């Protein structure tokens, strides 16, 4: 019987397999940041263990960093960042600190450097590590105990997850993006639907996505409960990778591409679970609740909790969000718009937002936050920052920003945002803050009208 | 890691689905670089509500959390596990867990027990009726017992052995250091390094 992409990549990384034990899996790349690593380094020191492969490890500062120039004001945040610097110096790990040209959100910089390649195993103490699966590798988030384990051994003991195919047939209509697609997929399978699985996204609509779009889709796999999501490498993948600083060159490139082509799921392979989605029927999609599965088409209304799969949770969510069932989503008024994050902080996302904002003015507080300093530089070379500033939006430095409340970019109690990030959990962007997850296009159009809006709605 | 074999204690019923790790411990608490003091952050936003179940004096000292489906979804923060343990929980019982949370729990010796939703609801009702009810969780027998009833649960043999022995995962892996070295000799030559 044929094998799936996930099975092929997994099998290639099994260091040791024994009856009744989890596989010992080799890790090709370990990404670290300041939040989930300090206790892991402490553990190494206490046990007097070295980092086994510092040259397969890379660090950046992202969660705590302010997105306006200047030092970190919060002493606790500053200590955490300084601790990462000390640890990286002590253990010989490459670090991209604040202000460095290579600094950025951990899941933006891996692909940008060409460190993220097909067929690899990649981990990070961050659940959105699933982003890197867009290149056809197995990439998943881990906790701090496992960060320590990878630092010490470059391996992880793990049971192979089940496989799930999300088959996306048809083409995405004009104005419908990768973000709308993944929000619709999560609404369909639920926040726990992918639990215990690696998802492989397949089909015509997936093949048609850019690498940036594929990263947006894989990024939010964890929001469907799956630790990892992946997409088979193809010409789009190779074209994105070729020439990047850490991509193979010359004969090595040819050998790598030949291997990468062999990774695609075999025609006779069988998935444990199959979910089908019709891309051609999709429209811009937004969330109304407090988990990413509580979403609906922008053209619809806030649902009646009794019409949802979990009425108690929906009632709680509507109360927290300050919404009434039956209200058209297009009438929901928004105070703040955030474009950025590991979900939608890449150059293509900024271009999409700029296309909407060109020649228009925003009526909300609008933060445009590039995912990395390189994305910032490229955007400025194209003049996108001028478009944003002319529209009245704030053009910021790279960081996680308003995705989570660890840096100064937060929501006040009761403040409502349209956000291109990945989680609308209660209080995640600040206690009492209310967040609607949207695409960059919808975020930009919403900034123009002050209500949830698609670009097609603008005059 | 402290070994886990059998634990008997009182429980708190948390009748909410999709309790993500941002709720278990909000991000502002994640700035600490130590491993201690996270109990203050446990459900810190919800605990501001005097009616929140953890504030009920009847449940003080409870060591078993009876949660709803999809407990511990979202962020990979192991701080969620540390917060639960440092507050005094030894066991979380739920119909389904977020994968990363469940994994983190078993690394730290917090036992995640999956029981069918109907059984968890029975347990929640029993504890709501009698907060002093004692529940016994026997990892060796893979069984939860209370008030003359009991229910079996599944956990793989390897994880059960590791938890009942309180073994350090890294130490176990380093016993196989030769296998890791042998694997490294066969890695594909184009794989990147960060230097």
Image (cartoon, coloured by chain):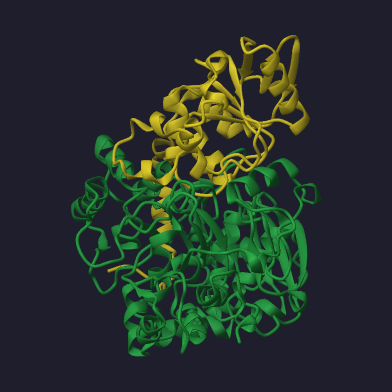
Chain colours: A green, B yellow
Q: Position of residue B152 (x, y in %)?
A: 72, 24
Q: Is residue A116 left or right of residue B19?
A: left
Q: In this rendering, would A394 be left or right of A10?
A: left
Residue drawn 35% across the image and 72% down it? A372
Residue closer to the observer: B152 or A152: B152
Q: Nearer the viewer, residue B186 or B46?
A: B46
Q: Is residue A399 visible?
A: yes
Q: Is residue A63 above or below residue A23?
A: below
Examine the rendering and report whether any part of residue A136 can be seen: no
Relative to A456, residue A119 above or below: above
The mark tally for this picture is 0
Quadrant of res B145: top right
Figure check: B170 above or below A415: above
Identify which residue is drawn at 65% across, 78% down: A176
Image coords of residue A234 (percent x, y): 59, 81
Q: Quadrant of residue A181?
A: bottom right
Give the quadrant of the N terminus of chain A. bottom right
Vertical arrangement, residue A298 with respect to residue B92, above or below: below
What residue is at 23 percent from the left and 69 percent from the top?
A: A99
Point 66% across, 23% down: residue = B142
Residue B88 screen position, x and y as percent:
46, 22
**Which quadrant of the rendered structure holds the C terminus of chain A?**
bottom right
- Residue A319 at what x, y percent from top left? 63, 45
* Quadrant hosting residue A282: bottom right
Residue B54 or residue A102, whichever sits in front: B54
Residue in the foreground of this view, choosing between B24 and A437: A437
Q: Residue furthest right?
A: A307
């Amino acid at each position: 019987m044929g094998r799936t992409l996930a099975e092929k990549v997994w099998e290639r990384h099994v260091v040791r397999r024994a009856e009744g034990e989890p596989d010992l899996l080799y890790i090709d790349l370990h990404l670290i940041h300041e939040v989930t690593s300090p206790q892991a380094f402490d553990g190494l020191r206490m046990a007097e263990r070295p980092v086994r492969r510092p040259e397969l490890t890379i660090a950046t500062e992202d969660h705590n960093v302010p997105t306006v120039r200047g030092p970190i004001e919060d002493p606790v945040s500053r200590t955490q960042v300084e601790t990462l610097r000390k640890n990286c110096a002590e253990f010989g790990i490459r670090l991209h600190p604040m202000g460095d040209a290579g600094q950025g959100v951990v899941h933006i910089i891996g692909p940008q450097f060409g460190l993220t390649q097909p067929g690899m195993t990649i981990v990070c103490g961050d659940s959105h590590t699933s982003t890197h699966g867009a290149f056809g590798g197995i990439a998943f988030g881990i906790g701090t105990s496992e960060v320590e384990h990878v630092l010490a051994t470059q391996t992880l003991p793990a049971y192979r997850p089940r496989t799930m195919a999300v088959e996306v047939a048809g083409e995405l209509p004009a104005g419908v993006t990768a973000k709308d697609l993944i929000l619709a997929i999560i609404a369909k399978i639920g926040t726990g639907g992918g639990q215990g699985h690696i998802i492989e996204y397949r089909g015509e609509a997936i093949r048609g996505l850019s690498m940036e779009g594929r990263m947006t889709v894989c990024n939010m796999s964890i929001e469907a409960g799956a630790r990892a999501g992946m997409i088979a490498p193809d010409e789009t993948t190779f074209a994105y990778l070729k020439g990047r600083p850490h991509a193979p060159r010359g004969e090595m490139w040819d050998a790598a591409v030949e291997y990468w082509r062999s990774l695609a799921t075999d025609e006779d392979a069988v998935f444990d679970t199959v979910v089908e989605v019709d891309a051609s029927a999709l429209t811009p999609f937004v969330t109304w609740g407090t988990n990413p599965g509580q979403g609906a088409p922008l053209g619809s209304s806030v649902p009646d909790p009794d019409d949802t799969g979990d009425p108690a949770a929906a009632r709680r969510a509507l109360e927290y969000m300050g919404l009434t069932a039956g209200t058209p989503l297009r009438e929901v008024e928004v105070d703040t718009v955030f474009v950025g994050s590991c979900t939608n902080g890449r150059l293509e996302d900024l271009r999409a937002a700029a296309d909407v904002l060109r020649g228009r003015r925003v009526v909300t507080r609008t933060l445009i936050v590039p995912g990395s300093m390189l994305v910032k530089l490229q955007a400025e070379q194209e003049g996108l920052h001028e478009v944003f500033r002319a529209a009245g939006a704030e053009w910021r430095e790279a960081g996680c920003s308003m995705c989570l409340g660890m840096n100064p970019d937060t929501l006040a109690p009761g403040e409502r945002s349209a956000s291109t990030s990945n989680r609308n959990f209660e209080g995640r962007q600040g206690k009492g803050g209310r967040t609607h997850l949207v695409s960059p296009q919808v975020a930009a159009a919403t900034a123009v009208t002050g209500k949830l809006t698609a670009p097609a709605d603008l005059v | 890691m402290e070994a886990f074999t059998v634990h008997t204690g009182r429980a708190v019923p948390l009748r909410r689905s999709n309790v993500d790790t941002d709720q278990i411990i909000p991000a502002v608490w994640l700035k600490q670089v130590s491993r201690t003091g996270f109990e203050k952050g446990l459900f810190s936003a919800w605990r501001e509500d005097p009616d929140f179940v953890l504030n009920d004096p009847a449940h003080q000292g409870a060591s078993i959390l009876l949660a709803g489906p999809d407990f511990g979804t979202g962020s990979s923060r192991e701080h969620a596990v540390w917060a639960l343990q440092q507050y005094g929980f030894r066991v979380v019982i739920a119909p389904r867990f977020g994968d990363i949370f469940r994994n983190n729990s078993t690394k730290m010796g917090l036992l995640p027990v999956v029981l069918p939703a109907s059984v968890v609801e029975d347990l929640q009702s029993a504890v709501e009726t009698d907060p002093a009810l004692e529940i016994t969780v026997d990892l060796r027998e893979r069984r939860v017992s209370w008030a003359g009833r009991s229910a079996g649960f599944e956990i793989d043999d390897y994880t059960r052995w590791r938890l009942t022995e309180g073994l350090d995962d890294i130490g176990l892996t380093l016993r196989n250091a030769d296998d890791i070295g042998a694997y490294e000799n066969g890695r594909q030559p184009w794989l990147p390094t960060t230097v």
